Amino acid sequence: MKMVLRWFGQGFDPVPLEYIRQVPGISGVVPMLCDLPAGEPWPMDRVLAMKSQINAHDLEMEVVESVNVHEDIKLGLPSRDRYVENYIATLKVLGEAGVRVVCYNFMPVFDWIRTELARVLDDGSTTLAYKGVLVDGVDPQDFAKSFQANSGGFALPGWEPERLVSLSKLFAAYREVGEEELWRNLAYFLEAVIPEAEKAGIRMAIHPDDPPWSLFGLPRIITGERGLERLVSLVDSPSNALTLCSGSLGADADNDIPALVRRFGGMGRIAFAHVRNVKRRREKDGSIDFYDAAHFSTAGSLDMYEIMRAYKDIGFGGYLRPDHGRMIWGETGRPGYGFYDRSLGASYLLGIWEALEKSK
Ligand SMILES: [Mn+2]
């Protein structure tokens, strides 16, 4: 298992690589080219420049998150073939640069969704939170505007201003696309891309939908065991793999994370593990409330020991990273990516791992 940390790239991440290098046990960072819109091919010179910058800090660049999928592919528009070709070109470049895993997602319109970027917890830290009543029945345009106004100047992945402009057009387009159609479009994409990923030595690792249910009437399909099962059966290849995100899937109490790790990890289909905790509760009105908790088991609803034990038991040899961090110790930065808290998370997870290893 290799412990890695997400890094958004020079100029897009307030955390310097110098600092990441000081976190014990981190083998590499997981970057992306933030300024390239979805669908644009990644130029070799920029990928290599990023790699040498990362390598100069004794860190590896073997995982990339995310190479975003153009909306036309998700919608199944005739223009999708051009974007599929661009995606394949990017995979070739990344493979040549030594990247082994590419994380992506297939969520319509939005990436992850929260209603608060800085909910204050009892200990004074702040974190991402989701209140179902603020999403259910709310107009997505209004929601997007209020979200942007509260993001503190950071463009959140999937919420880039240039995407929000065309929001109403997109919602109209998705009125024609239900879950089955989205599955067909995902299959079309994977059937084209996976053979090329194999050639490039890359494992494609889909990130589950976050949160794992439908929002604003948009279809969402990578939400639990049945979706994951269907995904791996679309193309039977080790390159058609998963990013198993415990926090995303764990927002739904029906998802048994250790069981999912054992099942899909046992099949060799987990290429990338996101391990984080989430604290969820159901309100009196039946709506769901959750927030991204500290990584410790006692801080949230997930048993992190059992999750790591499942990875240990299947002999997990892929990449693993802590996920969303709270803001602690006065840190300001990219919402959801507090560096101090993610460092605590990495240390905690590595501590569990060492204990599991030595008690075998
Ligand atoms: Mn994740």
Image (spheres, grey):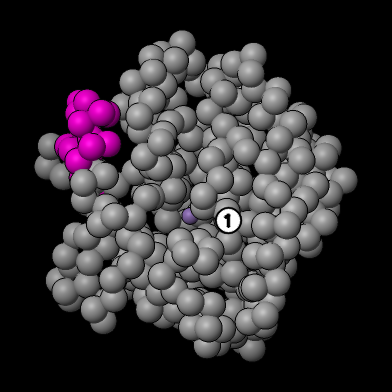
Q: Residue at x 19, y 60 (%)?
A: 119
Residue, far left: 284
| Residue 191 can be seen, yes or no | yes
- Which of the 4 quarters of the picture holds residue 97? bottom right
Please state if 137 lies on the left or on the right of 162 as rendered. left
**Residue 334 vertical position relative to residue 269 in the rendered view, above or below:** below
- Residue type at mark 1 is Met
Q: Nearer the viewer, residue 22 or 267?
A: 22
Where is residue 217 drawn, in percent x and y? Answer: 34, 22
Position of the C terminus by quadrant: bottom right
Q: State the residue lying farthest toward the front.
A: 45
Decide: few, some or many residues near mark 1? Use Cα within 10 Å; few <14, some 14-19, many ≥20: many
Please state the extent of the stretch shown in magenta in the rendering.
129-146
Would you place residue 346 above or below residue 190 in this image? below
Asked whether 130 falls inside the magenta stretch, the response is: yes
Query: Does residue 181 appear left or right of residue 343 in this picture?
Result: right
Q: Secondary structure at mark 1?
A: loop
- Seen from the viewer's position, the closer of residues 189 and 55 is 55
Q: Does any portion of residue 269 appear in the rendered image?
A: no
